[in-house]
């Protein structure tokens, strides 16, 4: 507790390039950028594969690979190979690890829609894209949102680890603190990251409540 | 009118779902496709709105080949009702019903007014309109399904086992509701079921299909019962064919005796062996004179011969009490009268 | 290191494969297996009674699942850091958070698994006179196995890959190869580490899959027919 008081009470942590708000914004920036990129890849791909049923192997393989690939190893290798001149190389693993949860859940969401519903939609004269966007997407939305939430939380965590290979953000407090044996900085940074992750989790949970039709959310969902 | 002209559906693996089918579904009538599972009845139905495309032959909708029409456009002009209703869970009931009008570009207010009108028409409380599908019972959802299919007032309605997932009591009421609606609307309905009783109850004409997608017989229910084309149809119709056929014979053929009724004020009857029906002042049946035994009634001319026979079997006397539509006794059908009517019915 | 280092140097693998050094590949592998396996086993042992309790007393499920959701969202690195004052730079610092992650996946899996037992099966077991305990052991748990083991596969694989983050506090098993690679600007250990961890994950996944086949012979019969 004392560490925390020292950390948050230290005026050095509230000004200059290492100030808490600056680090927080950095972390938010990287995470948001990675999540948006991942969503731009994962959602259309998930919709396409789920709707057409073609290429579902990609989904299964990417899901398993993403779980098995060690984050730190990927970060280290990318940075060793591409250098640290810009932050873009660091974003690659962040995006790569965020795509699978989005892709898998979007795919599962679309594919899991009751075939009767799809049938009824076509039978009433909706065209392919109308079936997808007017019926399948609203019904699959809880899973799409779940995928985004899991990806967001994952990105926030990976971005913290990425401080080790030179990325800014809240992870810096931990990595720099470990290097200089400044334990109050390590604890302070850890608490900030945990708080940040929980805030992201809460935000997405809330967004899901707002966006998903009450007619759909009564349905039981699986993770 | 929907015309099937030598229609065959063959899948790439060689499986033939529908084999050289030719039949006509008359305008304004209910045509039922019935048969065991694997007989291609659903495939046949789905070829009409091109959910499945036929491999050979032609399907004409009022003379024009459905293959010449863009499927979504075709489907917007054909109502489609399926087993689990297939309601959109994310839309309120009123918006579910208004789906096709929205697709056709009706303005929102008009579409919703139409939806409300239809909900009432299929016997649903207007309060249901603002609910979501999961808040409704299976039978209510099925009614919404029918309302949704009718929303844009399509001349043709396709119904794929619409009532098979609800319990028997609800099913009976949905069937009667459909007949009542059809009496008002006169749609061209093609109805798929595996239940022969449902087929006979609803169909103006019934097509019995056998496994492999071949048409076994296409006839009015009465003809089906009296002259099944072959053993398959006979077996599929099941037992009690003779009795069930009487449902299609009017009770008006029964010769009634009016001398077997007495008003409650008058005392003894003509003889001790005859069963006399005591009638109250306002014409309602009271009971057998001097005998505390049950009696059965039917509505003369409106009910079928089967109902009259049933009424007779329920009476200890073996006589059926004939009523008019307001419940007043018009006479008694004796065993002799029933006998004559039955032998006439047997002769066709 | 010069700029022309090869992507992969086999000689490094040979000389570091099995030495007395605690950082030899074999020793790191052993540490990795222990740190990833213990959370999986602990998680399974705790999640079974916890999940069953949630099934038995439905009101427990809502709060439990909320807690599990929150745990699942916690990033691993800061958790390791916050445990250091209690557990120091030991394996426990890595094992404890991973155990909680395992719980976060396995408790819902146990609840879903029990939910996958068809009601008519449960009812007929009751009607035949099974005592609640026998019914659980002989009827319900076997039917729940596929769902629970599906969760276990997820946990095994992610546990194996997550251990490597522990390298930042010197307890990462094969993950230590990543910090080594970064400090020396040397590709080979990083690649070797990634490959070994993915292979280990595959092996772990395969073992759980084999266990599932063994425990549910009827599923195999169904697949074959």
Image: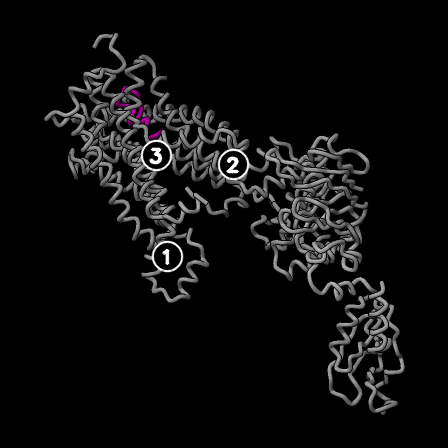
The residue labelled by disc 2 is A110
User: Residue B251: within the magenta?
Assistant: no
Percent position (x, y) of residue B141?
A: 62, 51
Q: Residues within 10 Å of mark 2 (few under 14, many from 20)?
A: many
For the N terminus of chain A, which image quadrant? Answer: top left
Q: Residues within 10 Å of mark 1 (few under 14, many from 20)?
A: some
Residue at 50%, 48% (x, y): give it. Answer: A218
Look at the image and give the residue range highlighted in magenta.
A155-170
Marks 3, 1 in one chain? no
Can you tell which quarter of the image residue C119 is in? bottom left
Chain letter for mark 2, please. Answer: A
Q: Are the residues tagged 1 and 2 within 8 Å (C-beta)? A: no
**Is residue B253 visible in this depiction of the protein?**
yes
Nearer mark to the viewer, of 3 and 1: 1
Can you tell which quarter of the image residue B48 is in? top right
Q: Secondary structure at mark 3?
A: helix
For marks 1 and 2, give the CA distance. 33 Å
Percent position (x, y) of residue A202?
A: 40, 38
Can you tell which quarter of the image residue C39 is in? top left
Q: Nearer the viewer, residue B34 or C90?
A: B34
Q: Is residue C79 above or below residue B314?
A: above
The residue labelled by disc 1 is C139
Q: Is residue B307 above or below residue B114?
A: below
């Amino acid at each position: 507790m004392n560490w925390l008081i020292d950390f948050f009470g230290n005026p050095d942590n509230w000004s200059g390039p290492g100030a808490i708000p600056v680090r927080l914004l950095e972390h938010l920036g990287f995470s948001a950028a990675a999540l948006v990129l991942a969503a731009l890849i994962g959602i259309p791909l998930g919709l396409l594969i789920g709707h057409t049923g073609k290429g579902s192997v990609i989904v299964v393989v990417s899901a398993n690979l993403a779980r098995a690939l060690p984050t730190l190893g990927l970060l280290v290798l990318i940075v060793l190979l591409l250098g640290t001149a810009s932050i873009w190389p660091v974003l690659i693993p962040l995006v790569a690890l965020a795509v699978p949860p989005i892709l898998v859940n979007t795919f599962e969401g679309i594919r899991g829609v009751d075939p009767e519903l799809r049938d009824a939609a076509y039978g009433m004269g909706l065209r392919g894209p109308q079936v997808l966007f007017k019926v399948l997407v609203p019904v699959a939305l809880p899973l799409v949102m779940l995928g985004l939430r899991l990806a967001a939380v994952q990105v926030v965590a990976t971005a913290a680890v990425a401080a080790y290979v030179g990325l800014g953000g809240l992870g810096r407090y931990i990595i720099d603190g470990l290097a200089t044996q400044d334990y109050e900085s390590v604890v302070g940074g850890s608490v900030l990251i945990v708080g940040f992750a929980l805030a992201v989790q809460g935000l997405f949970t809330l967004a899901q409540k707002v966006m998903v039709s009450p007619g759909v959310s009564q349905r039981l969902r699986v993770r | 009118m929907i015309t099937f002209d030598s229609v065959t559906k063959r899948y790439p693996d060689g499986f033939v779902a529908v084999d050289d089918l030719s039949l006509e579904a008359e305008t304004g009538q209910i045509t039922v496709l019935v048969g065991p599972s694997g007989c291609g009845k659903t495939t046949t139905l789905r070829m009409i709105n091109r959910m499945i495309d036929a491999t050979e032959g032609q399907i004409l909708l009022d003379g024009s080949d459905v293959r010449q029409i863009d499927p979504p456009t075709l489907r917007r002009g054909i109502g489609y009702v399926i087993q689990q209703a297939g309601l959109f869970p994310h839309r309120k009931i009123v918006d579910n019903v208004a789906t096709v009008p929205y697709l056709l570009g009706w303005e929102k207010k008009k579409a919703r007014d139409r939806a409300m009108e239809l909900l009432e028409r299929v016997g649903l409380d207007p309060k249901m309109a603002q609910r979501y599908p999961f808040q409704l019972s299976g039978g209510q959802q099925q009614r919404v399904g029918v309302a949704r299919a009718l929303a844009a007032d399509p001349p043709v309605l396709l119904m794929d086992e619409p009532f098979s997932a609800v319990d028997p009591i609800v099913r009976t009421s949905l069937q009667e509701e459909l007949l009542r609606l059809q009496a008002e609307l006169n749609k061209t309905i093609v109805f798929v079921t595996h239940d022969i009783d449902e087929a006979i109850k609803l169909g103006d004409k019934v097509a019995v299909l056998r496994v492999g997608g071949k048409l076994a017989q296409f006839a009015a229910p009465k003809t089906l019962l009296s002259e099944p084309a072959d053993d398959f149809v006979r077996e599929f119709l099941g037992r009690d064919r003779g009795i069930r056929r009487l449902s299609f014979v009017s009770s008006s053929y029964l010769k009634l005796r009016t001398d077997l009724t007495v008003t409650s004020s008058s005392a003894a009857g003509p003889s001790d062996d005859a069963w006399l029906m005591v009638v109250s002042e306002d014409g309602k049946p009271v009971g057998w004179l001097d005998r505390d035994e049950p009696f059965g009634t039917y509505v003369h001319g409106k009910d079928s011969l089967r109902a009259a026979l049933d009424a007779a079997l329920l009476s200890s006397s073996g006589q059926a009490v004939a009523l008019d539509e307001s419940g007043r006794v018009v006479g008694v059908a004796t065993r002799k009268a029933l006998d004559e009517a039955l032998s006439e019915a047997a002769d066709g | 290191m010069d700029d022309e280092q090869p992507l992969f140097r086999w000689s490094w693998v040979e000389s570091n494969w099995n030495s007395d050094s605690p950082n030899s590949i074999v020793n790191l592998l052993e540490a990795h297996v222990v740190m990833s396996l213990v959370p999986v086993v602990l998680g399974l042992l705790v999640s079974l009674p916890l999940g069953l309790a949630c099934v038995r007393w439905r009101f427990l499920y809502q709060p439990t699942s909320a807690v599990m959701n929150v745990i699942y969202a916690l990033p691993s690195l800061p958790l390791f850091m916050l445990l250091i004052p209690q557990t120091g730079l030991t394996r426990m610092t890595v094992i404890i958070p991973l155990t909680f992650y395992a719980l976060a996946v396995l408790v819902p899996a146990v609840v879903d698994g029990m939910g996958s037992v068809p009601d008519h099966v449960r009812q007929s077991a009751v009607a035949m006179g099974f005592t609640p305990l026998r019914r659980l052991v002989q009827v319900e748990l076997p039917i729940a196995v596929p769902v629970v083991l599906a969760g276990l596969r997820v946990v095994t694989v992610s546990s194996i890959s997550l251990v490597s983050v522990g390298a930042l506090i010197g307890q990462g098993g094969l993950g230590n190869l990543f910090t080594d690679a970064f400090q020396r600007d040397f590709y080979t250990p990083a690649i070797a580490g990634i490959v070994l961890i993915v292979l280990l994950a595959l092996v772990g996944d395969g073992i759980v899959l084999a266990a599932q086949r063994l425990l549910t012979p009827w599923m195999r019969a169904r697949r074959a027919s």
